[in-house]
Amino acid sequence: MSSLSIADALAYRGQLAALSDSADLDTALLLCHCLNKPRSYLYSWPERELTATEQAQFQGLFTRRLAGEPIAHILGYRDFWSLPLAVSPASLIPRPDTECLVERALEIIISQDKPQILDLGTGTGAIALALASERADAAVLGLDYVAEAVALAESNRVALGLSNVCFLQSDWFAAIDATQYQLIVSNPPYIDPDDPHLLEGDVRFEPRSALVAADSGMADLKHIISQAPSYLAEGGVLLLEHGFQQAAAVREVLSERGFSNVESRRDYGGNERISWGVWRNE
């Protein structure tokens, strides 16, 4: 096996161009993982040759990525809201656009003292942990139906040293009493089961239970909207992530259920990605 320099390894990115729109980054992250070095090192020492062990590891990981396996699963983590989160095939890989939901959630609770927050379908715990890390005075509860996801979220909590968030297994609201939350957030399954994109990219390696919902992807969104008022305080807010073509439908369901001040916001790609409404007991 001929020796491979850092520059040679980075050139592998060309093989990924047709698979990934982040081929440069994917290749660099895999190489950094094998070398245990930051990305700056790659460009400071391009002529440095990999050891036989490093080269074998890099080529093995690159082959997995070339086969379509998500970079987050290969590395075992994904950064979200500056937090390094362990990931696994048991849950959805956190997406950058979900940070839009975190941003809006923080705006909603900015003037509230010790807010109680509920995160439904927490997965890795990304949303709950991001909010808990920003608001030390908040009490955050994350729920997920999948026991493996709950265990993963809890391990992320421990690794981050956050004491103001906890996780429970629950089928949506089933395991909790009608506590009055100031904010309920959720990134539920919202993809139509017949969507052809389910056969492409990273989603092929993620659990369908975290991705798809009946009724053209609206079933879980409708269920949450229907049940949430029983768990919201006066003036509490329900904040939801949804598909880029579902905003109008979600706003309609929120309004029909009796929520006021119903609005949507676009994600970083310009698509309407999150919607919310205020609950008032009138």
Image (cartoon, rainbow, N blue to C red):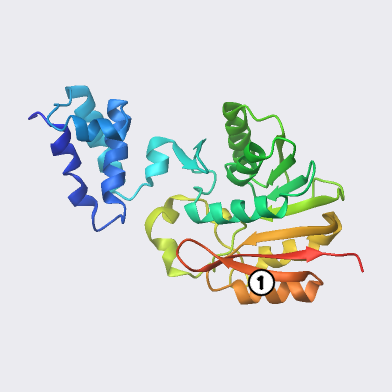
- Furthest residue in direction left, as rendered: 2
Q: Is residue 24 left or right of residue 124?
A: left
> Which sits in the foreground, 60 or 87?
87
Q: Is residue 105 left or right of residue 51?
A: right
For residue 234, what is the image quadrant?
Answer: bottom right
> Which sits in the foreground, 100 or 193?
100
194 w.r.t. 139: above or below: below
Residue for badge 1: 250
Q: Position of residue 54 (x, y in %)?
A: 23, 26
Q: Position of residue 42 (x, y in %)?
A: 23, 33
| Crowd tier of the residue under label 1, counting other residues whose Cα lies within 10 Å: few below 14, some 14–19, many 20 or above | many
Q: What residue is at 86 percent from the left and 48 percent from the top?
A: 179
Q: Position of residue 267 (x, y in %)?
A: 51, 62
Q: Quadrant of the C terminus?
A: bottom right
Q: Amino acid at mark 1?
A: Val
110 w.r.t. 271: above or below: above
> Which sits in the foreground, 189 or 130?
130
Q: What residue is at 38 percent from the left and 61 percent from the top?
A: 200
- Furthest residue in direction front, as rendered: 111
